Image: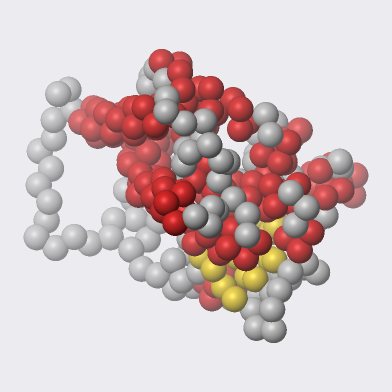
Amino acid sequence: MSDSSDYVPPKVWTWDKASGGQFANINRPIAGPTHDKALPVGRHPFQLYSLATPNGQKVTILFEELLAAGRSGAEYDAWPVRIGDGEQFGSGFVEINPNSKIPALVDRSGPTPIRIFESGAILVHLAEKFGAFLPEAAAARAETLSWLFWQMGSAPFLGGGFGHFYAYAPTKIEYAINRYAMEAKRLLDVLDRRLAETEYVAGDQYTIADMANWPWFGGLALGRAYGAAEFLDVQTYKNVQRWAKAIDARPAVKRGRIVNRLSGDPSEQLHERHDAGDFATRTQDKLAAQG
């Protein structure tokens, strides 16, 4: 190893604000709000507070798929949460997600608003509510939920592990990158072997398991994550490539992946989503016109 260190962990760890890294300004070892800020509320039954990260994309893709499938009751307002500015620590957001992570949803379709946080919980809630993208048969349902929670369990290794140390850490640590690159490739191999047997992740049906896995593993396969496509040799995972491209071509996925996107190609940004017509006139175009 080329990055040996004389670091010895202290007996009791204390918070070092100068630890560095892309997200050092918002990371902290305590929970709770840092400031008072109420959340906006739109006119639709569902109020989503999110950002177009892989976890955020899961939910907006499901909403767009539900609407495309004719579930008109799934209309939603999607409000951006600028996590780089610490908006996830506002009092209104912490009230609906005490863990201060996006996405968070308030279901106002009934007499009493219901909060749902954690992307997997939101996917299950919506799929059950609308009877779509989650099979009813016991075996197929169990398979879908297994692959959904497989992704939830793998995300820390792929994002907080590989993604952080390869793309965001202030220094390149050989041990950490090797450790998590190995795990990222193992996970890609698990998925590739599965997709050699089935069209979709959970079987022959397109489900919330695909919507959960695609923003993460599809993003890697299509070269959209961490600038790591060549490093991880993603083209060798032929079945993942086939699956990733097929889902990428779905119109609802094309819409869902740009909702609450605040950076990158302007043609792939929709800062807020309040109506299907917003896709025809991007939010940033409206803001530019007002300026």
Which residue lies at the image location 54% right of the left edge and 53% below the top edge?
Answer: 135
Q: Is residue 20 left or right of residue 195?
A: left
Q: Residue 245: which quarter of the image?
A: top right
- Between 274 and 269, which is closer to the camera in this rendering? 274
Which residue lies at the image location 13% right of the left edge and 30% below the top edge?
Answer: 4
Residue 128 in the image: x percent, y percent?
58, 63
Q: Is residue 8 left or right of residue 239?
A: left
- Above or below, 114 against 8 in this view is below
Q: Residue 230: which quarter of the image?
A: top left
- Above or below, 136 against 157 in this view is below
Residue 10 in the image: x percent, y percent?
11, 56
Outermost residue to the right: 289
Residue 68 in the image: x percent, y percent?
76, 47
Which residue lies at the image location 75% right of the left edge and 57% below the top edge?
Answer: 71
Which residue lies at the image location 42% right of the left edge and 25% below the top edge?
Answer: 196
Does the image show residue 51? Answer: no
Does the image show residue 97? Answer: yes
- Above or below, 129 against 195 in this view is below
Snapshot colouring: secondary structure
Pick the quarter of the image with the N terminus. Answer: top left
- Between 278 and 203, which is closer to the camera in this rendering? 203
Q: Is residue 218 left or right of residue 167?
A: right
